[in-house]
Amino acid sequence: MPKTEPEPHSGADLSRVPTDTDDLVRQLREAQERTLEYWIEAVLASAAGSMTVKKLQNSVSWRVTRPLRAVKIVQLKVREAGVRRTLRMVTERLAQIRQARKRG
């Protein structure tokens, strides 16, 4: 019995396969825009009580990575504004958080 090899992309619509890097870059940007739009909508909806964002924020991984996200934000601010300005901004923000906690 002769051995037959499966056809590559069998069952796929080859007319939709990108032919060059420009097509790939365009498709990547479109996918990124769709993803960004999805999360923007989810965040905006969270202000109105969306469960998607609330579930994400209540997940263990979100809570565990929260300090890492804060460090990354500060690191980017240092690159952008410098150490002294960033330190001043962080100090002010921490004071605001403390005051809010005192008020209840």
Image (cartoon, rainbow, N blue to C red):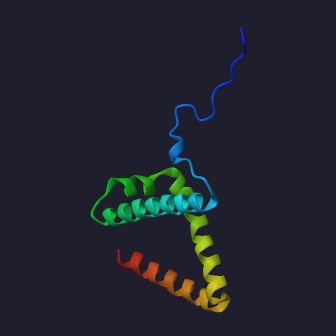
Residue at 40% across, 59% down: 38
Residue at 56% across, 56% down: 64
Give 28 or 42, whichever is nearer the viewer.
28
What is the x, y in percent for residue 44? Answer: 34, 66
What is the x, y in percent for residue 101? Answer: 41, 75
What is the x, y in percent for residue 51? Answer: 33, 53
**Outermost right residue:** 2
Give 25 or 41, whichever is nearer the viewer.
25
Residue at 69% across, 19% down: 4
The N terminus, quarter of image: top right
Give 48 or 98, whichever is nearer the viewer.
48
**Outermost left residue:** 48
Residue at 48% across, 61% down: 30
The C terminus, quarter of image: bottom left
Q: Quadrant of the rendered structure where residue 47 is?
A: bottom left
Residue 12, compared with residue 103, is above or below; it is above
What is the x, y in percent for residue 99? Answer: 42, 82
Give 22 or 86, whichever is nearer the viewer.
22
| Number of numbered discs overlaid on the protein picture | 0
Q: Quadrant of the rendered structure where residue 68 is?
A: bottom right
